[in-house]
Amino acid sequence: MRKVKIFDTTLRDGEQAAGGALTLEEKLEIGRQLERLGVDCIEAGFPATSPGDFRAVEMMCQVVKDCQVAALSDAKLPNIETTGAALKGAVAPRLHTVLSTSDIHLQHQLRISREAALEMAVAAVKLGRRLIPEVEFSAMDAARSDWDYLCRVFEATISAGATVINIPDTLGYMQPAEFAALVAYVMEHVSNIDRAAVSVHCHNDLGMATALSLAAVKVGAQWVECTVNGVGERAGNASLEEIVMTLKTRADYFGVETGVRTEQIWRSSRLVASYMGFPVQPNKAIVGSNAFAHASGLHQDGMLKERSTYEIMTPESIGRTDSRLVISKHSGRNAFRNRLRQMGYELNEDEFMRAFKAFKEIADKKKDVTDGDIEAVVADQVLTVEETYRLEHLLVTCGDPAVPTATVRIATPDGQTHQDAATGDGPVDAVCRAINRLVDVPNRLSEFSVQSVTAGIDAIGEVSVKVESDEGTFIGRGASTDIVVASARAYLNALNKVVAARRDRESGHARVKLSQDGSLRADSPPVASAEPVLA
Ligand code: MN
Protein backbone atom coordinates (compact mmCIF):
# COMPACT_ATOMS: atom_id res chain seq x y z
CA MET A 1 0.00 0.00 0.00
CA ARG A 2 1.11 3.57 -0.70
CA LYS A 3 2.28 5.36 2.42
CA VAL A 4 0.90 8.79 3.36
CA LYS A 5 3.17 10.75 5.67
CA ILE A 6 2.01 12.79 8.61
CA PHE A 7 3.46 16.23 9.27
CA ASP A 8 2.39 17.36 12.72
CA THR A 9 2.19 21.09 13.33
CA THR A 10 0.60 21.04 16.79
CA LEU A 11 3.64 22.86 18.20
CA ARG A 12 3.69 25.55 15.48
CA ASP A 13 0.22 26.24 14.05
CA GLY A 14 -1.42 24.89 17.21
CA GLU A 15 0.90 26.77 19.52
CA GLN A 16 0.10 29.99 17.61
CA ALA A 17 -3.51 29.52 18.69
CA ALA A 18 -2.56 28.85 22.30
CA GLY A 19 -0.94 32.27 22.44
CA GLY A 20 2.51 30.90 23.15
CA ALA A 21 1.40 29.57 26.50
CA LEU A 22 3.43 26.34 26.41
CA THR A 23 6.63 26.16 28.41
CA LEU A 24 9.74 24.72 26.81
CA GLU A 25 9.40 21.58 28.94
CA GLU A 26 5.81 21.09 27.82
CA LYS A 27 6.76 21.49 24.15
CA LEU A 28 9.46 18.85 24.55
CA GLU A 29 7.07 16.48 26.34
CA ILE A 30 4.57 16.88 23.51
CA GLY A 31 7.40 16.37 20.99
CA ARG A 32 8.40 13.10 22.66
CA GLN A 33 4.79 11.93 22.65
CA LEU A 34 4.45 12.79 18.93
CA GLU A 35 7.58 10.75 18.28
CA ARG A 36 6.00 7.85 20.20
CA LEU A 37 2.83 8.36 18.17
CA GLY A 38 4.89 7.76 15.05
CA VAL A 39 4.40 10.95 13.02
CA ASP A 40 6.89 11.46 10.16
CA CYS A 41 7.72 15.11 10.87
CA ILE A 42 7.25 17.43 13.83
CA GLU A 43 7.08 21.15 13.14
CA ALA A 44 8.51 22.60 16.33
CA GLY A 45 8.18 26.36 15.89
CA PHE A 46 9.03 29.56 14.04
CA PRO A 47 12.58 30.31 15.27
CA ALA A 48 12.89 33.81 13.82
CA THR A 49 9.92 35.10 15.83
CA SER A 50 11.45 34.89 19.30
CA PRO A 51 14.39 33.53 21.28
CA GLY A 52 11.92 31.19 23.01
CA ASP A 53 10.83 29.67 19.69
CA PHE A 54 14.44 29.40 18.56
CA ARG A 55 15.37 27.51 21.70
CA ALA A 56 12.33 25.25 21.50
CA VAL A 57 13.31 24.18 17.99
CA GLU A 58 16.96 23.77 18.95
CA MET A 59 16.08 21.61 21.97
CA MET A 60 13.52 19.58 19.99
CA CYS A 61 16.29 18.70 17.55
CA GLN A 62 18.23 17.19 20.45
CA VAL A 63 15.31 15.33 21.99
CA VAL A 64 13.59 13.90 18.88
CA LYS A 65 15.55 11.31 16.90
CA ASP A 66 13.02 9.03 15.19
CA CYS A 67 11.40 11.53 12.85
CA GLN A 68 12.06 14.76 11.00
CA VAL A 69 12.02 18.06 12.87
CA ALA A 70 10.80 21.05 10.86
CA ALA A 71 10.87 24.76 11.54
CA LEU A 72 8.93 27.48 9.76
CA SER A 73 10.27 30.69 8.27
CA ASP A 74 8.92 33.44 6.09
CA ALA A 75 10.88 34.12 2.88
CA LYS A 76 13.15 36.82 4.33
CA LEU A 77 16.74 35.67 3.91
CA PRO A 78 18.02 36.61 7.39
CA ASN A 79 15.12 34.62 8.87
CA ILE A 80 16.00 31.62 6.71
CA GLU A 81 19.54 31.84 8.12
CA THR A 82 18.18 31.92 11.68
CA THR A 83 15.91 28.95 10.98
CA GLY A 84 18.79 26.96 9.52
CA ALA A 85 20.83 27.67 12.65
CA ALA A 86 18.02 26.50 14.93
CA LEU A 87 17.74 23.21 13.01
CA LYS A 88 21.40 22.35 12.75
CA GLY A 89 21.42 19.76 15.56
CA ALA A 90 18.60 17.64 14.12
CA VAL A 91 19.10 14.10 12.85
CA ALA A 92 16.65 14.84 10.02
CA PRO A 93 15.95 18.58 9.74
CA ARG A 94 13.42 20.21 7.42
CA LEU A 95 13.37 23.90 6.65
CA HIS A 96 9.84 25.06 5.85
CA THR A 97 9.52 28.41 4.13
CA VAL A 98 6.29 30.14 3.24
CA LEU A 99 5.23 32.96 0.92
CA SER A 100 1.80 34.02 -0.30
CA THR A 101 0.82 33.41 -3.91
CA SER A 102 -2.74 34.81 -4.02
CA ASP A 103 -3.27 38.20 -5.64
CA ILE A 104 -5.24 39.31 -2.58
CA HIS A 105 -2.20 38.75 -0.34
CA LEU A 106 0.35 40.04 -2.86
CA GLN A 107 -1.55 43.27 -3.56
CA HIS A 108 -2.87 44.15 -0.13
CA GLN A 109 -0.45 42.61 2.34
CA LEU A 110 2.95 42.20 0.71
CA ARG A 111 2.38 44.91 -1.95
CA ILE A 112 4.62 43.21 -4.49
CA SER A 113 4.07 41.89 -8.00
CA ARG A 114 3.68 38.21 -8.88
CA GLU A 115 7.12 38.28 -10.49
CA ALA A 116 8.74 39.76 -7.37
CA ALA A 117 7.05 37.15 -5.17
CA LEU A 118 8.28 34.36 -7.42
CA GLU A 119 11.85 35.67 -7.19
CA MET A 120 11.61 35.94 -3.39
CA ALA A 121 10.37 32.37 -3.11
CA VAL A 122 13.18 31.08 -5.31
CA ALA A 123 15.82 32.99 -3.33
CA ALA A 124 14.42 31.70 -0.03
CA VAL A 125 14.45 28.08 -1.23
CA LYS A 126 17.96 28.40 -2.69
CA LEU A 127 19.36 29.73 0.57
CA GLY A 128 17.40 27.13 2.53
CA ARG A 129 18.91 24.32 0.47
CA ARG A 130 22.43 25.60 1.12
CA LEU A 131 21.72 25.23 4.85
CA ILE A 132 19.43 22.18 5.11
CA PRO A 133 19.03 19.25 2.67
CA GLU A 134 15.23 19.04 3.03
CA VAL A 135 13.34 22.24 2.13
CA GLU A 136 9.58 22.61 1.97
CA PHE A 137 7.98 25.52 0.16
CA SER A 138 4.42 26.52 1.12
CA ALA A 139 2.37 28.78 -1.13
CA MET A 140 0.30 30.62 1.43
CA ASP A 141 -3.34 31.10 0.39
CA ALA A 142 -2.74 28.69 -2.52
CA ALA A 143 -6.45 27.91 -2.53
CA ARG A 144 -7.28 31.48 -3.63
CA SER A 145 -4.33 31.81 -6.03
CA ASP A 146 -4.39 31.74 -9.80
CA TRP A 147 -3.79 28.07 -10.61
CA ASP A 148 -1.33 28.66 -13.44
CA TYR A 149 0.69 31.21 -11.48
CA LEU A 150 0.73 28.79 -8.54
CA CYS A 151 2.11 26.05 -10.80
CA ARG A 152 4.81 28.42 -12.08
CA VAL A 153 5.87 29.20 -8.50
CA PHE A 154 6.04 25.50 -7.63
CA GLU A 155 8.01 24.72 -10.78
CA ALA A 156 10.52 27.47 -10.00
CA THR A 157 10.89 26.54 -6.33
CA ILE A 158 11.39 22.86 -7.20
CA SER A 159 14.09 23.93 -9.69
CA ALA A 160 15.62 25.98 -6.87
CA GLY A 161 15.80 22.85 -4.72
CA ALA A 162 12.51 22.48 -2.84
CA THR A 163 12.03 18.82 -1.93
CA VAL A 164 8.44 19.25 -0.75
CA ILE A 165 5.82 21.65 -2.10
CA ASN A 166 2.84 22.41 0.07
CA ILE A 167 -0.63 23.48 -1.10
CA PRO A 168 -2.37 25.15 1.83
CA ASP A 169 -5.98 26.17 2.10
CA THR A 170 -4.86 28.79 4.60
CA LEU A 171 -8.36 30.15 5.24
CA GLY A 172 -10.39 26.95 5.08
CA TYR A 173 -12.22 28.30 2.03
CA MET A 174 -12.32 25.35 -0.34
CA GLN A 175 -14.74 22.47 -0.88
CA PRO A 176 -13.43 18.89 -1.08
CA ALA A 177 -13.97 18.19 -4.79
CA GLU A 178 -12.60 21.63 -5.66
CA PHE A 179 -9.48 21.11 -3.56
CA ALA A 180 -8.92 17.65 -5.02
CA ALA A 181 -9.10 19.24 -8.48
CA LEU A 182 -6.52 21.87 -7.49
CA VAL A 183 -4.10 19.25 -6.13
CA ALA A 184 -4.55 17.11 -9.25
CA TYR A 185 -4.01 20.21 -11.44
CA VAL A 186 -0.72 21.01 -9.68
CA MET A 187 0.45 17.42 -10.01
CA GLU A 188 -0.38 17.43 -13.69
CA HIS A 189 0.87 20.88 -14.70
CA VAL A 190 4.11 21.28 -12.72
CA SER A 191 6.62 19.72 -15.14
CA ASN A 192 9.24 18.78 -12.52
CA ILE A 193 6.76 17.56 -9.86
CA ASP A 194 8.48 14.14 -9.83
CA ARG A 195 11.41 15.81 -8.00
CA ALA A 196 9.29 16.92 -5.02
CA ALA A 197 6.69 15.45 -2.70
CA VAL A 198 3.23 17.04 -2.60
CA SER A 199 1.87 18.15 0.76
CA VAL A 200 -1.40 19.80 1.88
CA HIS A 201 -2.28 22.01 4.85
CA CYS A 202 -5.96 22.65 5.51
CA HIS A 203 -7.90 24.79 7.93
CA ASN A 204 -11.29 24.21 9.45
CA ASP A 205 -13.11 27.52 9.06
CA LEU A 206 -16.02 25.82 7.28
CA GLY A 207 -15.55 22.51 9.10
CA MET A 208 -13.88 20.98 6.02
CA ALA A 209 -10.24 20.56 7.09
CA THR A 210 -10.31 16.77 7.39
CA ALA A 211 -12.44 16.31 4.26
CA LEU A 212 -10.13 18.55 2.22
CA SER A 213 -7.01 16.74 3.40
CA LEU A 214 -8.50 13.34 2.60
CA ALA A 215 -9.71 14.51 -0.82
CA ALA A 216 -6.10 15.53 -1.54
CA VAL A 217 -4.79 12.13 -0.38
CA LYS A 218 -7.27 10.41 -2.68
CA VAL A 219 -5.77 12.18 -5.72
CA GLY A 220 -2.18 11.48 -4.67
CA ALA A 221 -0.92 13.96 -2.03
CA GLN A 222 1.97 12.30 -0.17
CA TRP A 223 2.08 14.46 2.97
CA VAL A 224 -0.73 15.76 5.18
CA GLU A 225 -0.17 18.56 7.66
CA CYS A 226 -2.35 18.36 10.74
CA THR A 227 -2.54 18.81 14.51
CA VAL A 228 -3.61 16.73 17.49
CA ASN A 229 -7.23 17.57 18.41
CA GLY A 230 -7.31 19.86 15.37
CA VAL A 231 -5.87 22.78 17.36
CA GLY A 232 -4.66 25.74 15.33
CA GLU A 233 -5.33 29.24 14.11
CA ARG A 234 -8.99 30.31 14.34
CA ALA A 235 -11.20 27.21 13.82
CA GLY A 236 -8.07 25.07 13.79
CA ASN A 237 -6.21 22.71 11.47
CA ALA A 238 -7.06 19.35 10.05
CA SER A 239 -7.22 16.91 12.94
CA LEU A 240 -4.50 14.26 13.00
CA GLU A 241 -6.66 11.63 14.69
CA GLU A 242 -9.52 12.06 12.21
CA ILE A 243 -7.22 11.74 9.20
CA VAL A 244 -5.26 8.79 10.57
CA MET A 245 -8.30 6.85 11.76
CA THR A 246 -10.17 7.50 8.51
CA LEU A 247 -7.24 6.18 6.48
CA LYS A 248 -7.07 3.15 8.76
CA THR A 249 -10.80 2.43 8.99
CA ARG A 250 -11.33 3.04 5.26
CA ALA A 251 -8.12 1.54 3.90
CA ASP A 252 -10.44 -0.26 1.47
CA TYR A 253 -11.44 3.10 -0.03
CA PHE A 254 -8.17 5.05 0.13
CA GLY A 255 -5.70 2.21 -0.39
CA VAL A 256 -3.06 3.97 1.71
CA GLU A 257 -1.53 3.60 5.15
CA THR A 258 0.28 5.82 7.67
CA GLY A 259 3.07 5.00 10.08
CA VAL A 260 1.08 6.27 13.07
CA ARG A 261 0.79 3.98 16.10
CA THR A 262 -2.91 4.62 16.61
CA GLU A 263 -2.95 3.22 20.13
CA GLN A 264 -1.00 6.35 21.16
CA ILE A 265 -3.75 8.70 19.90
CA TRP A 266 -5.76 8.93 23.10
CA ARG A 267 -2.78 9.78 25.24
CA SER A 268 -1.52 12.34 22.71
CA SER A 269 -4.93 13.97 22.67
CA ARG A 270 -5.11 14.16 26.46
CA LEU A 271 -1.60 15.59 26.72
CA VAL A 272 -2.18 18.33 24.14
CA ALA A 273 -5.61 19.27 25.56
CA SER A 274 -4.21 19.55 29.04
CA TYR A 275 -0.97 21.40 28.21
CA MET A 276 -2.61 23.84 25.80
CA GLY A 277 -5.64 24.40 28.00
CA PHE A 278 -8.04 23.54 25.16
CA PRO A 279 -10.56 20.94 26.38
CA VAL A 280 -11.89 18.55 23.73
CA GLN A 281 -15.63 18.79 23.01
CA PRO A 282 -17.45 15.60 24.17
CA ASN A 283 -18.80 14.79 20.70
CA LYS A 284 -15.46 15.35 18.90
CA ALA A 285 -14.76 12.55 16.40
CA ILE A 286 -12.28 9.91 17.66
CA VAL A 287 -11.10 11.66 20.85
CA GLY A 288 -14.27 13.17 22.35
CA SER A 289 -15.32 11.67 25.68
CA ASN A 290 -18.54 10.41 24.05
CA ALA A 291 -16.93 9.22 20.81
CA PHE A 292 -17.43 5.58 21.77
CA ALA A 293 -20.40 5.94 24.13
CA HIS A 294 -23.56 4.24 22.94
CA ALA A 295 -26.63 5.88 24.42
CA SER A 296 -29.66 4.47 22.65
CA GLY A 297 -31.12 1.19 23.85
CA LEU A 298 -31.24 -0.24 20.35
CA HIS A 299 -27.52 0.44 19.82
CA GLN A 300 -26.59 -0.94 23.23
CA ASP A 301 -28.54 -4.08 22.49
CA GLY A 302 -26.64 -4.51 19.22
CA MET A 303 -23.30 -3.84 20.88
CA LEU A 304 -23.94 -6.53 23.49
CA LYS A 305 -24.75 -9.07 20.79
CA GLU A 306 -21.95 -8.20 18.38
CA ARG A 307 -19.76 -5.08 18.59
CA SER A 308 -19.39 -4.63 14.85
CA THR A 309 -23.14 -3.93 14.60
CA TYR A 310 -22.60 -0.36 15.79
CA GLU A 311 -18.83 0.07 15.95
CA ILE A 312 -16.63 0.89 12.93
CA MET A 313 -13.47 1.06 15.05
CA THR A 314 -12.69 0.14 18.63
CA PRO A 315 -11.73 2.47 21.49
CA GLU A 316 -8.79 0.11 22.10
CA SER A 317 -7.40 0.95 18.64
CA ILE A 318 -6.75 4.52 19.80
CA GLY A 319 -5.41 3.36 23.18
CA ARG A 320 -8.58 4.10 25.06
CA THR A 321 -9.25 1.28 27.46
CA ASP A 322 -11.35 2.93 30.18
CA SER A 323 -10.58 -0.18 32.20
CA ARG A 324 -11.23 -0.24 35.90
CA LEU A 325 -8.08 -0.56 37.91
CA VAL A 326 -7.54 -4.02 39.25
CA ILE A 327 -5.58 -2.40 42.03
CA SER A 328 -7.38 -0.76 44.91
CA LYS A 329 -6.35 1.37 47.82
CA HIS A 330 -4.97 -1.81 49.40
CA SER A 331 -2.60 -2.32 46.50
CA GLY A 332 1.07 -1.75 46.91
CA ARG A 333 3.64 0.22 45.02
CA ASN A 334 4.55 -2.59 42.66
CA ALA A 335 1.00 -3.05 41.42
CA PHE A 336 0.71 0.69 40.83
CA ARG A 337 4.08 0.82 39.14
CA ASN A 338 3.07 -2.05 36.83
CA ARG A 339 -0.17 -0.35 35.91
CA LEU A 340 1.68 2.88 35.05
CA ARG A 341 4.12 0.94 32.91
CA GLN A 342 1.26 -0.78 31.06
CA MET A 343 -0.19 2.66 30.42
CA GLY A 344 3.13 3.81 28.97
CA TYR A 345 4.37 6.12 31.69
CA GLU A 346 8.03 6.29 32.61
CA LEU A 347 8.41 8.25 35.82
CA ASN A 348 11.51 8.92 37.85
CA GLU A 349 11.49 7.83 41.50
CA ASP A 350 10.47 11.22 42.88
CA GLU A 351 7.61 11.57 40.39
CA PHE A 352 6.54 8.00 41.09
CA MET A 353 6.36 8.54 44.85
CA ARG A 354 4.34 11.71 44.42
CA ALA A 355 1.98 9.96 41.99
CA PHE A 356 1.63 6.98 44.36
CA LYS A 357 0.79 9.21 47.31
CA ALA A 358 -1.80 11.06 45.18
CA PHE A 359 -3.23 7.72 44.00
CA LYS A 360 -3.68 6.54 47.59
CA GLU A 361 -5.52 9.75 48.43
CA ILE A 362 -7.82 9.32 45.41
CA ALA A 363 -8.43 5.63 46.20
CA ASP A 364 -9.53 6.63 49.70
CA LYS A 365 -12.13 8.98 48.27
CA LYS A 366 -13.33 7.11 45.19
CA LYS A 367 -14.82 3.65 44.89
CA ASP A 368 -13.69 3.00 41.32
CA VAL A 369 -10.31 4.30 40.22
CA THR A 370 -10.10 4.32 36.42
CA ASP A 371 -7.21 4.74 34.03
CA GLY A 372 -8.56 8.24 33.37
CA ASP A 373 -8.16 9.05 37.07
CA ILE A 374 -4.63 7.70 37.04
CA GLU A 375 -3.79 9.83 34.00
CA ALA A 376 -5.07 12.94 35.75
CA VAL A 377 -3.14 12.11 38.89
CA VAL A 378 0.09 11.45 37.04
CA ALA A 379 -0.25 14.60 34.91
CA ASP A 380 -0.74 16.55 38.11
CA GLN A 381 2.35 15.07 39.77
CA VAL A 382 4.84 15.02 36.91
CA LEU A 383 6.45 18.38 37.21
CA THR A 384 7.00 20.43 34.09
CA VAL A 385 8.14 23.35 36.21
CA GLU A 386 10.13 23.79 39.39
CA GLU A 387 7.80 24.03 42.36
CA THR A 388 8.74 27.35 43.93
CA TYR A 389 5.43 27.56 45.74
CA ARG A 390 3.79 24.37 47.03
CA LEU A 391 0.33 24.19 48.52
CA GLU A 392 0.58 22.81 52.03
CA HIS A 393 -2.79 23.58 53.53
CA LEU A 394 -6.09 24.97 52.36
CA LEU A 395 -9.25 25.74 54.29
CA VAL A 396 -12.28 27.32 52.64
CA THR A 397 -15.62 28.26 54.08
CA CYS A 398 -18.54 29.23 51.89
CA GLY A 399 -22.29 28.99 51.85
CA ASP A 400 -25.49 30.94 51.39
CA PRO A 401 -25.46 33.44 52.93
CA ALA A 402 -21.76 33.62 53.80
CA VAL A 403 -18.63 35.48 52.76
CA PRO A 404 -16.37 32.96 51.00
CA THR A 405 -13.12 32.89 52.96
CA ALA A 406 -9.91 30.99 52.25
CA THR A 407 -6.93 30.29 54.46
CA VAL A 408 -3.86 29.18 52.54
CA ARG A 409 -0.48 27.89 53.67
CA ILE A 410 2.33 27.69 51.12
CA ALA A 411 5.77 26.12 51.44
CA THR A 412 8.84 27.50 49.67
CA PRO A 413 12.08 25.63 48.82
CA ASP A 414 13.97 27.28 51.71
CA GLY A 415 11.80 25.20 54.07
CA GLN A 416 9.67 28.11 55.22
CA THR A 417 5.90 28.21 55.28
CA HIS A 418 3.74 31.25 54.74
CA GLN A 419 0.10 31.64 55.69
CA ASP A 420 -2.61 34.18 54.96
CA ALA A 421 -6.34 34.46 54.41
CA ALA A 422 -8.67 36.39 52.14
CA THR A 423 -12.31 36.75 51.20
CA GLY A 424 -13.69 36.73 47.66
CA ASP A 425 -16.78 36.56 45.44
CA GLY A 426 -16.65 32.78 45.59
CA PRO A 427 -14.41 30.09 47.07
CA VAL A 428 -12.01 29.99 44.09
CA ASP A 429 -11.73 33.77 44.03
CA ALA A 430 -11.00 33.76 47.78
CA VAL A 431 -8.28 31.11 47.29
CA CYS A 432 -6.61 33.10 44.49
CA ARG A 433 -6.72 36.30 46.52
CA ALA A 434 -5.16 34.56 49.53
CA ILE A 435 -2.41 33.12 47.32
CA ASN A 436 -1.74 36.55 45.79
CA ARG A 437 -1.22 37.98 49.27
CA LEU A 438 1.57 35.44 49.79
CA VAL A 439 3.44 35.45 46.48
CA ASP A 440 5.19 38.30 44.73
CA VAL A 441 3.93 37.60 41.22
CA PRO A 442 1.91 40.34 39.49
CA ASN A 443 -0.64 38.48 37.34
CA ARG A 444 -4.11 38.44 35.88
CA LEU A 445 -6.19 35.28 35.74
CA SER A 446 -7.83 35.39 32.29
CA GLU A 447 -9.36 31.92 31.89
CA PHE A 448 -10.64 29.28 34.26
CA SER A 449 -12.19 25.93 33.39
CA VAL A 450 -13.16 22.76 35.22
CA GLN A 451 -13.60 19.40 33.53
CA SER A 452 -14.54 16.11 35.11
CA VAL A 453 -12.20 13.28 34.19
CA THR A 454 -14.72 10.48 34.54
CA ALA A 455 -18.44 10.17 35.12
CA GLY A 456 -20.07 10.20 38.54
CA ILE A 457 -20.44 12.51 41.50
CA ASP A 458 -17.07 11.42 42.92
CA ALA A 459 -15.23 12.24 39.65
CA ILE A 460 -11.86 13.91 39.67
CA GLY A 461 -12.03 17.52 38.57
CA GLU A 462 -9.28 18.87 36.36
CA VAL A 463 -8.88 22.62 36.57
CA SER A 464 -7.07 24.63 33.91
CA VAL A 465 -6.25 28.32 34.39
CA LYS A 466 -4.63 30.85 32.10
CA VAL A 467 -2.56 33.54 33.78
CA GLU A 468 -1.14 36.63 32.10
CA SER A 469 2.01 38.23 33.46
CA ASP A 470 4.97 40.39 32.43
CA GLU A 471 6.77 37.14 31.54
CA GLY A 472 4.03 35.99 29.17
CA THR A 473 0.92 33.84 29.31
CA PHE A 474 0.99 30.54 31.20
CA ILE A 475 -1.41 27.69 31.70
CA GLY A 476 -1.66 26.01 35.09
CA ARG A 477 -3.26 22.67 35.81
CA GLY A 478 -4.44 20.88 38.91
CA ALA A 479 -6.45 17.75 39.58
CA SER A 480 -8.36 16.62 42.67
CA THR A 481 -11.71 15.21 43.73
CA ASP A 482 -12.12 18.64 45.36
CA ILE A 483 -12.34 21.31 42.67
CA VAL A 484 -11.36 24.12 45.05
CA VAL A 485 -8.15 22.25 45.90
CA ALA A 486 -7.61 21.55 42.18
CA SER A 487 -8.10 25.28 41.50
CA ALA A 488 -5.50 26.26 44.10
CA ARG A 489 -3.02 23.78 42.60
CA ALA A 490 -3.71 24.99 39.06
CA TYR A 491 -3.22 28.61 40.06
CA LEU A 492 0.04 27.88 41.89
CA ASN A 493 1.23 25.78 38.94
CA ALA A 494 0.74 28.79 36.61
CA LEU A 495 2.45 31.14 39.08
CA ASN A 496 5.39 28.73 39.38
CA LYS A 497 5.78 28.96 35.61
CA VAL A 498 5.84 32.75 35.78
CA VAL A 499 8.53 32.61 38.47
CA ALA A 500 10.55 30.07 36.46
CA ALA A 501 10.33 32.22 33.33
CA ARG A 502 11.46 35.28 35.28
CA ARG A 503 14.40 33.34 36.74
CA ASP A 504 15.17 31.94 33.31
CA ARG A 505 15.22 35.39 31.72
CA GLU A 506 17.36 36.86 34.50
CA SER A 507 19.94 34.09 34.40
CA GLY A 508 19.82 33.65 30.62
CA HIS A 509 19.88 29.87 30.90
CA ALA A 510 17.48 27.15 29.89
CA ARG A 511 15.89 25.27 32.73
CA VAL A 512 15.43 22.09 30.78
CA LYS A 513 17.97 19.41 31.45
CA LEU A 514 18.48 16.25 29.50
CA SER A 515 19.85 12.98 30.74
CA GLN A 516 22.05 10.81 28.54
CA ASP A 517 19.16 8.83 27.13
CA GLY A 518 17.54 12.09 26.11
CA SER A 519 14.80 11.97 28.71
CA LEU A 520 13.90 15.07 30.67
CA ARG A 521 15.25 14.90 34.16
CA ALA A 522 15.45 17.60 36.77
CA ASP A 523 18.62 16.23 38.36
CA SER A 524 20.93 15.85 35.38
CA PRO A 525 23.49 18.45 34.24
CA PRO A 526 22.47 21.29 31.95
CA VAL A 527 23.06 21.07 28.21
CA ALA A 528 25.96 23.24 27.12
CA SER A 529 24.31 24.64 24.01
CA ALA A 530 21.32 26.01 25.87
CA GLU A 531 22.54 29.61 25.66
CA PRO A 532 20.21 32.34 24.43
CA VAL A 533 21.08 32.70 20.77
CA LEU A 534 19.02 35.65 19.68
CA ALA A 535 19.52 37.77 22.77
MN1 MN B 1 -1.93 27.13 9.12
Image: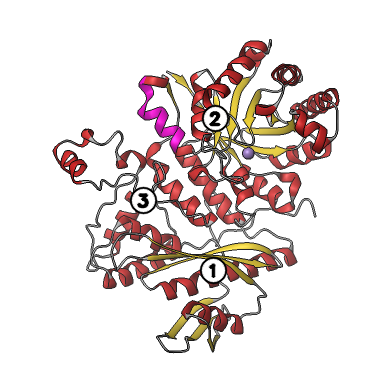
Tell me the kind of residue under disc 2.
Answer: Val
Mark 3 surroundings: few (<14), some (14-19) or many (≥20) residues within 10 A: some
The span from disc 1 to disc 3 (Cα, nearest Å) is 25 Å
| Residue 388 image point, x, y percent | 58, 73
| Residue 468 image point, x, y percent | 65, 66
- Magenta residues (range): 242-252
Q: Nearer the viewer, residue 140 or 382?
A: 140
Tell me the kind of residue under disc 3.
Answer: Ser
Q: Mark 1 — residue?
A: 493
Q: Residue furthest left?
A: 305
Give the residue at x 55% y 53%: 515
Contact between marks 1 and 3 (CB within 8 A): the answer is: no
Instruction: First in sequence, mark 3 or 2: give its number.
Output: 2
Q: Secondary structure at mark 2?
A: strand
Q: Nearer the viewer, residue 279 or 173?
A: 173
**Within the displayed image, which quadrant is ligand 1 positioned in?**
top right
Label 1 beta carbon within 8 A of ligand 1: no
Q: Mark 3 — residue?
A: 289
The colour style of the image is secondary structure
Give the residue at x 43% y 57%: 347
Mark 1 surroundings: few (<14), some (14-19) or many (≥20) residues within 10 A: many
Q: Is residue 478 left or right of residue 482?
A: right
- The answer to whether any part of residue 135 appears in the image is no
Instruction: First in sequence, mark 1 or 2: give its number.
Output: 2
- 1 or 3: mark nearer the eye: 3
The span from disc 3 to disc 2 (Cα, nearest Å) is 25 Å
Q: Quadrant of residue 127?
A: top right
Q: Which mark is residue 117?
A: none
Point out the image quarter for the N terminus: top left
Q: Mark 2 — residue?
A: 224
- The answer to whether any part of residue 377 appears in the image is yes
Rendered position, 338 above or below 312: below
